[in-house]
Image (cartoon, rainbow, N blue to C red):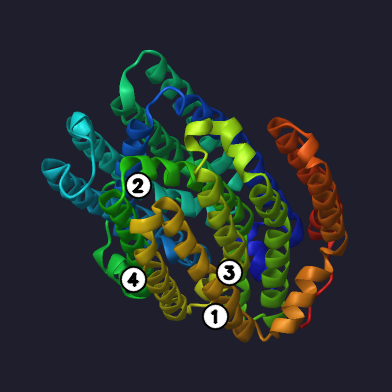
Amino acid sequence: MRNFVKAIVGVRDIHRIAARNIAWNYIGYIYQIGINLAFTAYIVRRLSVAEYGLFLFITSLSATLYFLDLGLSGILVKAYVEMTLDSDRGLLGELISTVFLALVALGAVGVLSSIILAAILPGPFNIPSAYAHESSVICVLAAFVVQINLPGISLELAYQASHRFDRITQIRVLTSTIQIVLSVAAVVTRHGIVALAVVQLLSSALRLFLLAAGLPASVPNAHLSLRRFNRDLLMSLVRLSKWAFLNNLATSLFELLAWTLLGSLSSMKEAAIYGLAIKLSDHLWNMIDKGANIALPLLSISCAEGDLEGIQRIYLKTQQLLFGAVLPFVVLGIFVAKPLIDIWAGSQYTSAALVMQYLLLGVISHAAGYSANQLLYASGQVTKATKIALWEYILSIACSLPLIARYGASGLAAGIAISQLCINFGWLTWAACEFSRTSLLAMVKFVMGGLSWPLVVLAAELLIISSISSHLSPPAVVIAALLSGCIYLGVWSIRMALSLYRSQSEIVA
């Protein structure tokens, strides 16, 4: 096992490289979340609610085109890890090049479909007639963003498979900074939401260029060539990814249907409220990903070796880490949702507070199910993971559909939260525990056992804030919640992060 691990990651201490990768991921993400939240607070005060809602609505519709990756993003890390050990060192570069070119072609299909959609807008959607032309232009520009980002997936996952999360973070920080600067300039000069879409396109192109330029120096034996396309290699990957593709397709169809229902049965104002509220939950969702995606290549290694103890160790540690890190954001976010929205976006978005509270409940369930989903993918049980996801989407639509027409964005958020709580805390977690031969009770004890002191601190903080909140102004309540979160994270860091970094003990269920 150790020789295998060293061949993949190039280090002797797998715990230390995991901690280093998590640190790099969060350094970049904390920076990104800071500038993104600040920019959102700036832009919502300079665009009308309907205009901002339209921009979010069109770009969200276009984002569903990411299903065109054919599910390859779900299996590429595992494929790259296995290819690294192959005696023919040119195969890794050939695999990267093949997937890159395939995703470029698939992205072109997405652009064509978006051009057709742009021609029929506003169509069935409640888009104000004054913004009909802008919506068509943004639709096409957003599709080109997807086409550029799709081949970037093949490159970024190669970095992940080689544990170069530091390089990924550096590229994201640079491109995010440039995007924010240009976006502010576009708003200041009153070029409108079309200019914002152009900025997104330019920053995506820069990111793709940097990923490609840095590949040979960052990933051993990885070379991108636009002339190396192996059809047989691609077909073998597509056969493996068919269930992952079905999962991605279901995700995209659900998001498309959710936004379509909101845009058709409600209004662009409700789209703006939902889009604003989901930003905070999306940031937490991404935070889960930043901390947990380093576990996928490690789980793939343990599954390839049949190392049951390694599988248990990585799965339980990841589960414990994610749940503990996300918990204060969810609990405190729900508690101060209204004053937070009012301060951040203004009183015109007050109704987004309830939407945010529902979505935060979904985030905590996502934290519980994320590492379980990764384990199923690493072990090759993509079929099971896809079936679970399909039922989650079906349940989400069934719960949301009767609520959207009456309650708008809050009805959609409530339906999503109900389905995610049921599926992630139930079926998905049970499936992962079954594969790792860990009882549900043992998993709960392990996760909660490391959070005893942080939970005591969090409970005490909530009690104190509740008792004094009536005497505080809204900004003071938010500041108190932020300070409470920092204290919790300080205690949690001592109990969890340092333990993850130094621990060499084996976990046996």
Question: What is the C-alpha distance between the residues marked 3 and 1?
Answer: 9 Å
The image shows residue 353, relative to residue 174, as above or below, that is: below
In the image shown, does 18 or 320 lie closer to the viewer?
Answer: 320
First-in-chain label (3 vs 1): 3
SS state under label 3: helix
Can you tell which of label 4 and label 3 is closer to the viewer?
A: 3
Can you tell which of label 1 and label 4 is closer to the viewer?
A: 1
First-in-chain label (4 vs 3): 4
Tell me the residue that label 2 is attached to: 60
First-in-chain label (2 vs 1): 2
Circle 4/circle 3 CB separation < 8 Å:
no
SS state under label 1: helix
In the image shown, does 253 or 306 lie closer to the viewer?
Answer: 253
Question: What is the C-alpha distance between the residues marked 4 and 2?
Answer: 20 Å
Q: Which mark is residue 246?
A: 4
Question: Quarter of the image containing the N terminus?
Answer: bottom right
Is 30 positioned to the left or the right of 243 in the image? Answer: right
The amino acid pointed to by label 1 is Trp
The amino acid pointed to by label 2 is Ser
